[in-house]
Image (cartoon, rainbow, N blue to C red):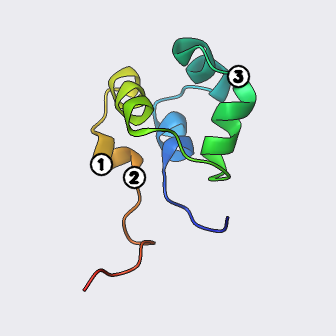
Amino acid sequence: MGRNINRIKVVLVDKRKTNKWLSEQLNVAPSTVSKWCTNDSQPSLETLMQISRLLEVKVDDLLRFDDLPEII
């Protein structure tokens, strides 16, 4: 896709957690978490909220706003 919308991988590294750990916590395939971490796909808002709780960060910390187009 070319757009870095989420920062899940960055936050996982900061929290010293792995993709495998997150996939086990969310009961999803490791390949799904991998796709989120590489921004090949995006988690739902509900899943983002679950990830934020698991990693003890705000949902905003998982998102990257500087790469989005400006809304006029």
Tags 2 and 1 in contact by the CB under 8 Å rule?
yes
Instruction: Give the label, 3 or 2, closer to the camera.
Output: 3
What is the three-letter code of the residue carrying label 2? Leu
**Mark 3 surroundings within 10 Å by alpha-carbon count, few (fewer than 14), some (14 through 19), many (20 or more):** few
Please state the horizontal and vertical placement of residue 51, each as a whole percent of the image. 42, 28
**Cα–Cα gap, marks 2 and 1:** 5 Å
Query: Circle 3 is placed at which residue position?
Result: 29
Q: Position of residue 72 (x, y in %)?
A: 24, 86
40 or 18, which is in the foreground? 40
Which residue is more in the foreground, 34 or 56?
34
Q: Looking at the image, which residue is at 51% across and 42% down?
A: 8
The residue to which callout 1 is attached is 60
Is 54 left, or right, of 34 in this rendering?
Answer: left
Residue denoted by label 2: 63
Relative placement, left or right, of 22 versus 60 is: right
Tell which circle, 3 or 2, labels the residue nearer the N-terminal end. 3
Callout 2 secondary element? loop
Task: Give the residue type at disc 1.
Answer: Asp
Classify mark 3: helix, strand or loop.
loop
Q: Between 42 and 33, which is closer to the camera in this rendering?
A: 42
Q: Position of residue 2 (x, y in %)?
A: 66, 68
Q: Residue at (39%, 25%) from the top-left corner?
A: 50
In the rendered image, residue 55, in percent from the top left (x then y), is placed at: 39, 27
Depicted 28 relative to depicted 36: above or below: above
Q: Furthest-right residue in view?
A: 31
Q: Residues within 10 Å of mark 1 (few under 14, many from 20)?
A: few
Residue 53, by quadrant, is top left
Residue 17 sits in quarter: top right
Mark closer to the observer (1, 3): 3
